[in-house]
Image (spheres, rainbow, N blue to C red):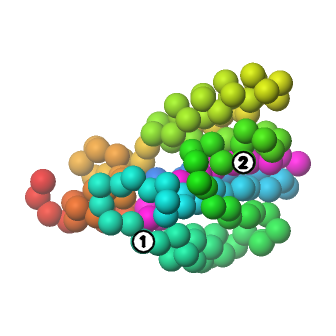
Amino acid sequence: MPKVAVGGTFQYLHDGHARLIEKAFEIAGSGKVHIGLTSDEMLQKSHNVDNYENRRARLLEYIKKMGVPEEKYEVTRLNDPCGPTLEEDFDYIIVSPETYPVALKINRIREKKGKKPLEIAYVEYVMAEDGIPISSTRIAKGEIDRHGRLKKEA
């Protein structure tokens, strides 16, 4: 039963986040997905981000709407980019182009500790209508909505 890690801030739960989360559950199959949610202390964003509890509530609601049973996942607080992946045994880590370098770092540290490297599942950015990746920053600026539809002329 695969143990899968995925992490993020998950501010607006846009289509890019959806693809990451769906991929995590697809790979986990009968296993379990461990979702690391960025703590308020770790945030370094150029736009305002809701507090941890609000983001966690929206994330749990989203997963519930996906129809995933509660025993198939857990959400934990991420206080650093690596979270529990350096100590606990995981089989896979799901990453976007933005988080891919973190997965490589995690695997280097794991190997130094004598642990097996994680299988990295790379999920490409989801593009907005204008061909630029959907991001929470762009949503916060009012450029696009959660699905990448343009809201105003750039």
Residue at the spot of label 1: 50
Left or right, 99 with respect to 145, comes to right
Left or right, 32 with respect to 76, comes to right
Picture coordinates of residue 38 (x, y %)?
54, 58
Which disc is residue 84 wearing?
2
- For the residue marked with disc 2, what is the amino acid? Pro
Q: Residue 40 or 115: which is nearer the viewer?
A: 40
**Residue 21, magenta (yes or no):** no
Which type of secondary structure does the marked residue at label 1 adopt? loop
Residue stretch in magenta: 1-15
> Is residue 130 positioned above or below 52 on the image?
above
Q: Residue 110 or 25: which is nearer the viewer?
A: 110
Whichever of labels 2 and 1 marks the residue nearer the N terminus, that label is 1
Picture coordinates of residue 129 (x, y %)?
28, 52
Q: Tell me which corner region of the image, top left, top right, bottom left or bottom right, holds residue 152.
A: bottom left
State how many labels appear.
Answer: 2
**Residue 9, magenta (yes or no):** yes
Q: Is residue 17 visible?
A: no
The residue under the point 72% across, 32% down is 119
Q: Is residue 83 visible?
A: yes
Q: Residue 104 or 1: which is nearer the viewer?
A: 104
> Is residue 151 positioned above or below 26 on the image?
below
Q: Which residue of the protein is positioned furthest toward the left in this rendering?
A: 153
Picture coordinates of residue 44 (x, y %)?
39, 53
Which disc is residue 1 wearing?
none
